[in-house]
Image (cartoon, grey):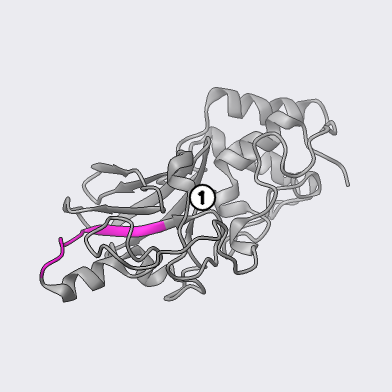
Amino acid sequence: MAALPADVQAMLASKCAACHGSVPMKGAPSLVSYANLIAPSSDPAMTYAERALTRIQSATMPPPPGTPATASDIASLQDFISKGYPKGSCATGAGGAPSMDPLLSMPTCTSTTSWAGGNRESASMNPGMACVTCHQKSGEAPIFSIAGTVYPTGHEPDLCNSKVGTDGARIVIIGADGKTLTLTPNAVGNFSSEIQVKTPFQAKVTFQGRERLMITPQTSGDCNGCHSQSGDNSAPGRVTVP
């Protein structure tokens, strides 16, 4: 299988894979392989690479809340096209690209450790559980506007601890008023805030230069309420790093 140049694959991983991954969002083409990029697009006169270049140049891709492509991103794809789609040496997983969509992983507790109870006032309690709903019912716990757990793979079980917060993952919430709230997960992946966010909001997870986007505006900040192990209300599974 032909490989992509490293700079092109890194650009696709950071700017496109959230929607155009190996299992793309509904209606979106996959843009992760050499074959994907050189194939004729919905406009037969253009390859998918050419169509992608047009869209990132016009700033319509990635869509909000994604970070716009940089001049270097655009130049990498433009150079790839202008030179006649030269093959590279970056196999899947190189050049900054994830080797596999984390939502395609089999159910597992990656950390192999779980919350065992104990201090019920700990910020590390109940990873994976619906934090906002639980806190509202208790009558004593803080009332969160946003809360959840971010995992390395998409189908981790309830109470499984996550470590990605210590590896640099961030949860970025963009309110309907344009204000941004950036949350740092703790040592088990839990994140929360009592700051009120104007709804509907959008969100993204940033990690090691890549982004995973939640394009559809949301009104509930109880992230684990939908991002359960198997996924509820059309969520694909856990909140995961890209």
Using residue 192 as the reference point, say whether residue 78 is left or right of it: right
Say left or right for 74 vs 135. Answer: right
Q: Main secondary structure of the magenta part?
A: loop
Q: Is residue 45 above or below residue 238?
A: above
Q: Which residues are magenta?
A: 140-149
Within-10-Å neighbours for mark 1: few <14, some 14–19, many 20+: many
- Residue that carries the numbered disc 1 in the rendered image: 241
x, y percent for residue 22:
68, 56
Q: Nearer the viewer, residue 195 or 44?
A: 195
* Residue 137 image position (x, y, % from top left): 17, 76
Q: Is residue 214 above or below residue 182?
A: below
Q: Tell me the amino acid under the disc marked 1.
A: Val
Nearest the eye: 201 or 208: 208
Residue 185 as seen in the image, left or right of residue 1: left
* Residue 226 spot, x, y in % from top left: 39, 71
- Residue in view at x 48 percent, y 49 percent: 163
Identify the image quadrant of residue 216. bottom left
Residue sitting nearer the eye, 10 or 29: 10
Q: In screen coordinates, is 113 left or right of 106?
A: left
Q: Element under label 1? A: loop
165 or 212: nearer the viewer: 165
Task: Count the numbered circles shown.
Answer: 1
List the single residue furthest toward the left. Answer: 139
Residue furthest out toward the right: 1
Q: Is residue 86 above or below residue 152?
A: above
Residue at x 35%, y 71% (from the top left corner): 225
Task: Identify which residue is drawn at 55% across, 62% down.
Answer: 154
Can you give x and y, in whole percent of width and height, for residue 102 in the image? 60, 57
Query: Given the current orientation, which residue lies at the most extreme front position?
Result: 118
Question: Is-magenta flag for residue 23?
Answer: no
